[in-house]
Image (cartoon, rainbow, N blue to C red):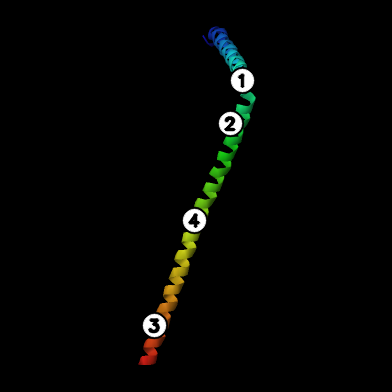
Amino acid sequence: MFITGLPFHQKSIDAAKAFLLEAIENLSKKGVNIREIKKQTQATEDKISTLDKKYEELLETRENLMILYKLEKEKRLEANQNGDNIREREED
């Protein structure tokens, strides 16, 4: 079954390639530069990929900063509480 269907699929692939080449030729006649479009598309995909990586890094940085903020806030609260305890002892 697989082997008998293979020529049919190859014919479909060949027909699609021929259609694509014809479409490219028609667009070229109309002044559309397919190569430039491909370059621009690739450049855009590269930029998107770079931005995605930066976004992930920013999420990690944000999370780390939040953890650091919570730790520093906790230390400040402890220091303030210790200062209040010292003042209370002085008053006594």
- Name which quarter of the figure residue 34 lies in: top right
Q: Residues within 10 Å of mark 4 (few under 14, many from 20)?
A: few
Which callout, 4 or 2, points to the residue nearer the camera? Answer: 2
**Contact between labelled residues 3 and 1, with CB atoms less than 8 Å apart:** no
Q: Nearer the viewer, mark 3 or mark 2?
A: 2
Mark 3 is surrounded, within 10 Å at the Cα level, by few (under 14), some (14 to 19) or many (20 or more) other residues, namely: few
Query: Which mark sits nearer the N-terminus, 1 or 2?
Result: 1
Helix, strand or loop at label 4? It is: helix
Q: Position of residue 42 (x, y in %)?
A: 60, 32
Distance in Å between CA atoms under marks 1 and 2: 18 Å
Instruction: Indicate which disc residue 84 carries.
Output: 3
Return the x and y of residue 2 as percentages of the image width and height: 53, 11
Q: Which residue is mark 4?
A: 62
Q: Amino acid at mark 1?
A: Gly
User: What's under tag 4, amino acid-wise?
Assistant: Arg
Q: Nearer the viewer, mark 1 or mark 3?
A: 1
Q: Marks 4 and 1: in contact by CB < 8 Å?
A: no
Seen from the viewer's position, the closer of residues 58 and 28 is: 28
* Closer to us: 16 or 3: 16
Where disc 2 sits, the SS reads helix
Can you give x and y, in whole percent of width and height, for residue 29 in the image? Answer: 61, 15
Tell me the SS state at disc 3: helix
Residue beneath the point at 39% across and 91% down: 90
Q: Which residue is mark 1?
A: 31
Q: Amino acid at mark 3?
A: Asp
What is the x, y in percent for residue 58? 52, 52
Q: Is residue 79 above or below residue 64?
A: below
**Pointer 2: residues within 10 angstroms few (<14), some, or many (20+)?**
few
Task: For the residues labelled 4 and 3, say whether their Cβ atoms are less than 8 Å apart.
Answer: no
What residue does disc 2 label?
Answer: 41
Above or below, 81 relative to 20: below
Residue 32 or 52: which is nearer the viewer?
32
